[in-house]
Image: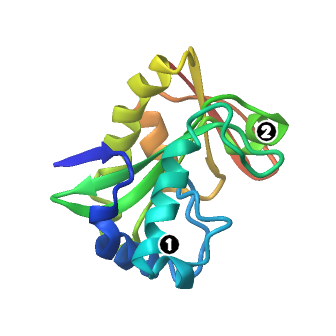
Amino acid sequence: MTGLELPDRKHHSSWLEAAAEFDGAHRDGSGTDDWPLELLRDPAEFGRFVDWLIADALPDSPRTPGYVPCTYLWIIDRNTVVGSLAIRHVLNDFLLNEGGHIGYSVRPSARRRGHAAAALHEALPIARGLGIDRVLVTCDEDNAGSRATIERNGGIYDDSRNGKRRYWIGV
């Protein structure tokens, strides 16, 4: 059964396997922008990465300029990392237009099995607990799978901006 879990060192090898499947492609919701995969192979560096992901939810944690507090979660199926999901606590201009409150990605070998839909469903009450009344979720215009995932979770299409479809979900 698919569920969301806080990042944890115990998933190091599974996380690395999932990350490798993306073959360098961007992984929305992963928090890896400033963390090279080669560095994260080292267990100590991976531990620092996990600690950083968890701390990023705190409003006073240091972060890259332009980034907002974010709760990072891993999508786990039978103790295997199948993806990642991020809940951004507030929207800046970029997130309002393109990124949204919630971003997620599922490793290629685990797609088309409902993992993203289950993860998004589980993330909505967490977003509500963070004080978010309406969640903005976006996807690329040509991403039919993500579009279906968002609509399956109650997403109401608002508009498209810069190649991104924008959906609002009441929580």
The relative height of residue 33 versus residue 115 in the rendered view (above or below) is below
Looking at the rendered structure, the secondary structure element under dot 1 is: helix
Q: In the figure, is residue 2 to the left or right of 155? A: left
Left or right: residue 162 versus residue 111 is right
Q: What residue is shown at x 45% (from left), y 18% (from top)?
A: 129
**Which of the labelled discs sits on residue 97, or is there none?**
2
At label 1, which amino acid type do we have? Glu
At which x and y percent is residue 14? 30, 72
Q: Please state which of the two labelled residues, at mark 2 or mark 1, is closer to the viewer.
A: 1
Instruction: Give the image location of residue 134, x and y in percent.
Output: 58, 19
Measured Cα–Cα span from mark 2 to mark 1 = 33 Å
Q: Is residue 103 above or below residue 11?
A: above
Q: Residue 114: give its label.
A: none
Q: Quadrant of residue 80?
A: bottom left
Q: Is residue 131 left or right of residue 163?
A: left
Residue 115 in the image: x percent, y percent? 31, 52
Q: Using the rendered image of the protein, determine whether residue 104 is visible from the camera's viewpoint.
A: no
- Residue at the location (47% across, 18% down)? 128
